[in-house]
Image (spheres, coloured by chain):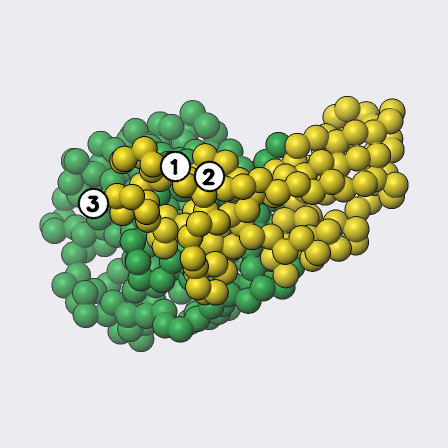
């Protein structure tokens, strides 16, 4: 028997809400939404953890400008604090090198980190998910009892069609979905908001494409002034902490 | 120490099995540790002794080590983890998350990081024995 799965919910016992920022498609801005959401919640005075679960293509460390931090070891692994967030990522162990992991390896690494990370007391744990509905989504739904999802899409039908599949899966699994964020909007079209309503979900925000974001990567002060950060702060205030 | 978290997982899992099998007193807990995770046995054993609940008071913890075998998926070469010479930082990274072996270890024959950890990954609870 794999003993690790038995302690996962104990490790998360003192964590309030656990929010997985997810999408059926890659490149829609999940990591930016997850990072700005975690920062927005921390700005409101909440204790927040950010866990980058995109093991093969992590990027929250680049957004936050993480440098020279390491977890501590004390009856488990204690995440370092980065920009006010308890921050966990595979990069603490893999550095900048590629992590070529197959599905079973992703599952094993995920279970390991969930079993040994000592998050302590948190109001929110934000999870930056890998794209799709593969091992990480299925493992988290199976292992983390109180998980809820926040879905990110772009206006592209290619993105939204995969989101629909993901939503159906989560609804079948009876997993709560906070709502849908539409990122990188190029115009005022409301079709994603309408389609979201048809799925029975809340449309949380339509965020215009912001060319300034690239310049804010690695600089949290600049990031706070971006449109995405401002809109996500509003989402946090009206849909998550209220 | 990270071994405490693993020991806690073993105790919790063993308690769950004891409850399911209605065992009142546990006599034996058999654990296998994969060489890849490089668990410090003394710390792990001490943690088990400190964490064990009342029903496990007289239990003996048997800990065996499984050699880690790696199989290359590209050229099908098989080799032992112990043949790799790792520096301290790399060994520590693999100790925390054994899957990062794919970051640091390559097939000695073809250089591919696409290998399977076929045996001896981490901590495994084999079985428990007790009385009802």
Q: Earlier in the sequence, mark 2 or mark 1?
A: 2
For image coordinates 51% across by 47% down, the residue present is B36
Chain in yellow, by letter, is B
- Specify whether disc 3 shares its chain with disc 2: no
The residues tagged by marks 2 and 1 sit, at their Cα atoms, a distance apart of 7 Å
How far from the left and from the top, in percent, is residue A123?
A: 55, 58
Which numbered circle lies on residue A207?
A: none
**Local crowd size for mark 1, using a 10 Å CA cut-off: few (<14), some (14–19), many (≥20):** some
Q: Quadrant of the N terminus of chain A?
A: top right
The residues tagged by marks 3 and 2 sit, at their Cα atoms, a distance apart of 44 Å
User: Which residue does the numbered mark 2 point to in the structure image?
Assistant: B69
User: Which residue does the numbered mark 1 point to in the structure image?
Assistant: B78
- Specify whether disc 2 shares its chain with disc 1: yes
Asked whether the residues under the numbered discs 3 and 2 touch, taking CB atoms below 8 Å apart as contact, a structural biologist would say: no
The residues tagged by marks 3 and 1 sit, at their Cα atoms, a distance apart of 45 Å
| A138, A96: nearer the viewer | A96
Residue A43 drawn above or below residue A110: below
Residue A238 placement: quadrant:
bottom left
In the rendered structure, the answer to whether residue B67 lies left or right of residue B87 reads right
User: Which residue does the numbered mark 3 point to in the structure image?
Assistant: A154
Asked whether the residues under the numbered discs 3 and 1 touch, taking CB atoms below 8 Å apart as contact, a structural biologist would say: no
How far from the left and from the top, in percent, is residue A15?
A: 58, 53
Residue A53 drawn above or below residue B120: below
Residue B130 appears in the rendering: yes
Chain in green, by letter, is A
């Amino acid at each position: 028997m794999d003993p690790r799965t038995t302690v996962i919910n104990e490790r998360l016992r003192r964590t309030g809400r656990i929010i997985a920022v997810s999408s059926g498609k890659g490149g829609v801005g999940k990591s930016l939404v997850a990072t700005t959401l975690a920062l927005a919640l921390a700005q409101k005075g909440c204790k927040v953890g950010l866990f980058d679960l995109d093991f093969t293509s992590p990027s929250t460390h680049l957004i936050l400008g993480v440098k020279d931090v390491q977890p501590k070891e004390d009856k488990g692994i204690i995440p370092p604090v980065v920009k006010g967030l308890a921050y966990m990522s595979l990069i603490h162990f893999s550095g900048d090198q590629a992590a070529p992991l197959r599905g079973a390896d992703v599952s094993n690494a995920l279970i390991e980190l969930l079993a040994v990370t000592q998050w302590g007391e948190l109001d929110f744990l934000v999870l930056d998910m890998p794209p799709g509905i593969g091992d990480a989504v299925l493992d988290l739904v199976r292992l983390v009892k109180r998980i809820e999802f926040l879905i990110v899409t772009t206006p592209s039908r290619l993105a939204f069609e995969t989101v629909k599949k993901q939503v159906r899966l989560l609804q079948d699994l009876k997993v709560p979905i906070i709502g849908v964020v539409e990122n990188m909007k190029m115009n005022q079209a409301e079709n994603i908001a309408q389609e979201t309503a048809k799925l029975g979900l809340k449309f949380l925000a339509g965020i215009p494409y912001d060319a300034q974001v690239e310049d804010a990567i690695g600089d949290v002060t600049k990031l706070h002034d971006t449109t995405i950060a401002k809109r996500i702060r509003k989402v946090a205030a009206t849909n998550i902490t209220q | 120490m990270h071994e405490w978290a693993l020991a806690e997982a073993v105790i919790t899992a063993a308690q769950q099995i004891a409850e399911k099998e209605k065992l009142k007193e546990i006599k034996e807990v058999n654990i296998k540790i994969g060489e890849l995770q490089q668990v410090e046995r003394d710390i792990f054993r001490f943690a088990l002794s400190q964490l064990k609940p009342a029903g496990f008071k007289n239990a003996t913890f048997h800990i065996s080590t499984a050699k880690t075998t790696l199989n290359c998926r590209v050229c099908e070469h098989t080799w032992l983890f112990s043949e790799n010479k790792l520096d301290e930082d790399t060994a520590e990274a693999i100790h925390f998350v054994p899957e990062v072996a794919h970051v640091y270890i390559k097939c000695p024959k073809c250089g591919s990081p696409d290998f399977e950890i076929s045996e001896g990954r981490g901590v495994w609870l084999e079985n428990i024995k007790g009385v009802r």
